[in-house]
Image (cartoon, rainbow, N blue to C red):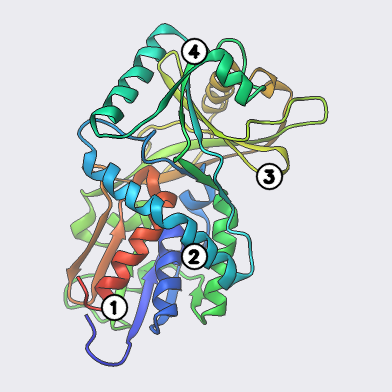
Amino acid sequence: MFSGARGSVIVVGGGVIGLSVAWRAAAAGFAVSVLDPAPASGASAVAGGMLAPLTEAWPGEEALLELGSASLRRWPEFARELAAASGRDAGLREEGTLVVAVDAADRADLLALADHLASLGRHAEPLTGKQIRSLEPAIGPSVRSGLSVPGDLAVDNRKVLAALRAVCEVESVRVAEVGPATVRLADGATRRADVVVLAAGAWSGQLYEPLRHVVRPVKGEILRLRATRSTLPPPSRTVRCSVQGNHVYLVPRDDGGLVVGATQYEAGFDTTVTAGGVRDLLRWAEQVLPTISEYEFVESAAGLRPASTDNLPVIDEFEPGLVVATGHHRNGMLLAPITADLVLARLEGKS
């Protein structure tokens, strides 16, 4: 995109995608600004932090699986570089993931996932309930079977965001807490930089008309809990559960913390946490982790996943001087390293 000296870049959106792009672009020599009225918030701050292309795999989404797997391979080095450059722990957890089922119907879903992965040459190790509890004693007796997927990792999303904010400061990225509408994104509009990177998540379609029917918000509620002295600690691994057809995940944090999520439904741009959402998440999680009812309740929150029409992210140059990086749905954390690489390649004219 540039031939000669490095140019200037405005990144619209200060979530994990926008900040990752800003870091990589600034480190490569571009003059970078980030515009976001509330940086490091939104869906990125609410995320569970799963890096789970295998356990998120679904028939018909093989392209997403390949993209996610490629990004997951980048994550250990991405985390090391981020920690070294920012001086902050990037929060990568490498204990792996368990997928567990409660009843016979849930076990059928589990077997379908294992068969699908096997058909793609991917492996997940079947486990009995006894084997699961030998790995994670806090998991209750209602769990009868599961799969071990050690390659699916997790990350503390808020540590990642804090590290990205810090590294952007190190790289002299200007983060302006102003509304993204100050950058006009229509053909022929005046821009304040050589390139605008639109990474505004679920709001991208509100800022750029060609995305209006491509990216939409999908609401998700999460809970943050913490074990107490009288309870067993949470699992060391991420636990993804199917409970009577309902899907819930339990993602550990340091110091006995646990993220429980997530509901999923179409609600426009509403981020209200509902009593029903909290009830359902606790009820489903308690089937798997019985002592969770005795945990400290720390936080409830809702975020808006930026969903695309085919669940693949939208990463492309839409017009001269405008690169789009949005539509990551539930995989923003997972896809941050590869998205930053792809956008940087665009900026450098390599793709």
Sequence-wise, the earlier of marks 3 and 4 is 4
Disc 4 element: loop
Residue at the limit of the structure toward the right, as seen here: 229
Q: Amino acid at mark 3?
A: Asp
> Which mark is on residue 102?
4
Name the residue rendered at 41%, 64% in the picture: 18
Asked if the residue under mark 4 is in contact with the one under mark 3, i.e. CB atoms within 8 Å, the reply is: no
Sequence-wise, the earlier of marks 1 and 4 is 4
Query: Residue 118: x and y, percent?
Result: 28, 28
Cα separation between marks 2 and 1: 20 Å
Task: Name the residue carrying label 1.
Answer: 195
Disc 3 element: helix
Asked if the residue under mark 1 is in contact with the one under mark 2, i.e. CB atoms within 8 Å, the reply is: no
Q: Nearer the viewer, residue 242 or 193?
A: 242
Task: Name the residue carrying label 2.
Answer: 37
Mark 3 vs mark 2: in front: 3
Query: Residue 83: x and y, percent?
Result: 58, 65
Sequence-wise, the earlier of marks 2 and 1 is 2
Q: Quadrant of the C terminus?
A: bottom left
> Is the residue marked by circle 3 packed among few (<14), some (14-19), or many (20+) residues within 10 Å?
few
Name the residue rendered at 68%, 44% in the picture: 254
Mark 1 vs mark 3: in front: 3
Disc 2 element: loop
Tell me if residue 59 comes above or below residue 211 in the rendering: above
Task: Name the residue carrying label 3.
Answer: 254
Tell me if residue 106 comes above or below residue 54 in the rendering: above
Q: Amino acid at mark 4?
A: Val
